[in-house]
Image (spheres, rainbow, N blue to C red):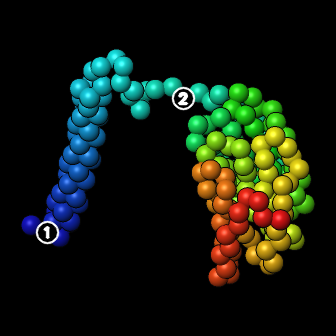
Amino acid sequence: MDMKSIRRANFSNVFTYIFVFILLIGALGYFLCIDDYFIEKELFKDPKEVNPRSSKVESLWNYTTGSNVLSIGISDDGKYIAMGSWDHKLYFFQNSSSTPLWSYDTGSTVPSVSLSSDGSYIAIGNGWPDYSVYLFHKSSSIPIWKYTSGNDYPRVAISGDGNYIAVAGSQTHYVYLFHRSSS
């Protein structure tokens, strides 16, 4: 056997290996598809069960802010939604409408929002240049109080009953606790 014959034989063996490899990959894909079909048919026999692959999800409503949404919160019962935006605003909604009940311009970005369990109280932390914490009641866009935290983006959390507001700096080491009746 000469060198050309050996090279041709090795070259054709390489093609054979590649061809077999492609066939195996195709067969594996075929069996995985059959497996998925079987799983869908077997696991979701009850028509009352939701099939996550075929269920249709629809939005109840949508709203477009003036800029990026930075934070969002929802009351435990889902009735109230508050969101903070890069456009310096806090937006407050009832779940039945895409029109805000009210909005408030803080003059700074709003990267942190928290609602009490029933949505009666809303705490927000806002960014540069204000770096403040605000507390609102759901009935008014006028803040109950405002606390200026200094030079850091405050992160807020409010207790379920709305009586306590915890504040932490995102880049500093401070933590504050306020009562709702603070002034």
Res. 174 visible in picture: yes
Res. 86 visible in picture: no
Q: CA distance from mark 2 to mark 1?
A: 68 Å
Amino acid tagged 1: Asp
Q: Residue 123's quadrant in the figure?
A: bottom right
Q: Do callouts 2 and 1 mark residues in contact (Cβ within 8 Å)?
A: no
At numbered mark 1, what does the secondary structure look like: helix, strand or loop? loop
The residue at which mark 1 appears reads as 2
Q: Residues within 10 Å of mark 2 (few under 14, many from 20)?
A: few
Above or below 141: residue 3: below
173 or 24, which lies in front?
Answer: 173
Q: Residue at x 51, y 25 (%)?
A: 56
Q: Measuring from the top left, give residue 146's x and y in whole percent.
A: 84, 63
Q: Measuring from the top left, give residue 34's x and y in whole percent.
A: 25, 31
From the viewer's perspective, is 43 left or right of 159? left
22 or 100, which lies in front?
Answer: 100
Q: Measuring from the top left, give residue 100's x and y in whole percent.
A: 81, 37
Mark 2 or mark 1, which has the lower sequence index?
Answer: 1
Q: Residue at x 73, y 34 (%)?
A: 94
Q: Nearer the viewer, mark 2 or mark 1?
A: 2
Q: Measuring from the top left, give residue 130's x and y in whole percent.
A: 86, 69
At numbered mark 2, what does the secondary structure look like: helix, strand or loop? loop
142 or 63, which lies in front?
Answer: 142
Amino acid tagged 2: Val
Q: Residue at x 9, y 67 (%)?
A: 1
The residue at which mark 2 appears reads as 57
Residue farthest along the bottom direction in this orientation:
173
Q: Residue 172's quadrant in the figure?
A: bottom right
Number of numbered discs: 2
Q: Residue 28's quadrant in the figure?
A: top left
From the viewer's perspective, is 34 left or right of 71? left
Q: Quadrant of the C terminus?
A: bottom right
